[in-house]
Image (spheres, rainbow, N blue to C red):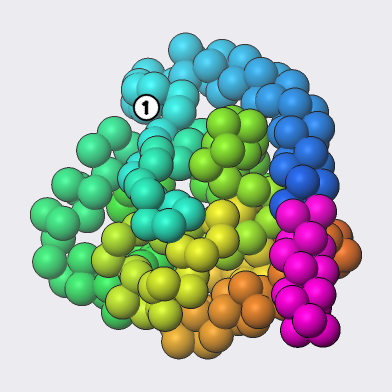
Amino acid sequence: MEKDSTEYNKLNDKCIYRFFKRLTDIILSLFGILLILLFSLFIFVYYIFDKRDRGPIFFKQSRMGLHGETFYMYKFRSMVVNADEKLKENPTLYKKYLENNYKLEPRDDVRMTRIGTILRNTSIDELPQFLNVLKGDMSLVGPRPVVAVELREYDAKKLLSVKPGIMGLWQAQGRSNIGYPQRADIEMDYVDNASYWFDLKVLLKNIIIVLKKDGAY
């Protein structure tokens, strides 16, 4: 009887956590959408005058979501059109990209545009993910959504048991300065310790990291 009561309390706590987490996601993502509209106008004006970089304002990429369902994650485009194809045209650079935790140093990345470098350094490129949060694909706080090939770095079942987030424990501890396998260990720590107050702590740490521009590339 006592065991049943304990299990019920855990389930009840989890339901309360999910309710308030989703409520917070909706409220803050509505504010975030105002920022998206503001910066969309700024970027649109820039593209009008920059004849060397014509293309869509937004970029979308398939990522792994809750329970392994794929979704399109949105960003402000910071790279040239057909960036993946351009990278794969250079086998040496593509190999370096894979070996460097699916990242390239800004000075090596032939895909980056001039305004894209600014967007990345300030993390403004991530703002459109508030649309993903409002849709329910993502949460404000959670493990960073990965592309399918990155799942091999994780305990996939565990990673996909929670919604991915705009901000997570990995970013709070250094973002791109931390690679695999340490990155996977950090994300798993979040899954093990997720709670509303822990989310707030991670959120505040992310804000500090963004302001300091640590690991922003």
Q: Is residue 22 depicted above or below 107 in this figure?
A: above
In the rendered view, does 51 fall on the left or right side of 179?
left
- SS for callout 1: loop
Q: Is residue 2 depicted above or below 42 in this figure?
A: below
Q: Is residue 118 depicted above or below 8 in this figure?
A: above
User: x%, y% of residue 88?
Assistant: 16, 56
Q: Nearer the viewer, residue 217 or 37?
A: 37
Residue that carries the numbered disc 1 in the rendered image:
53
User: x%, y% of residue 149?
Assistant: 27, 66
Q: Nearer the viewer, residue 40 or 64?
A: 64
Main secondary structure of the magenta stretch? helix
Residue 129 visible in the displayed image: no
How many C-alpha atoms fall within 10 Å of the one at disc 1: few (<14), some, or many (≥20)? some
Residue 146 visible in the displayed image: yes
Q: Residue at x 35, y 47 (%)?
A: 70
Q: Number of callouts in the render?
A: 1
In the rendered view, does 114 fall on the left or right side of 91?
right
Q: Is residue 206 depicted above or below 187 in this figure?
A: above
User: x%, y% of residue 19?
Assistant: 77, 46
Name the kind of residue labelled 1 in the image. Answer: Asp
Q: Residue at x 33, y 37 (%)?
A: 80
User: x%, y% of residue 178?
Assistant: 55, 79
- Numbered range of the magenta stretch: 1-16
Q: Residue at x 44, y 52 (%)?
A: 65
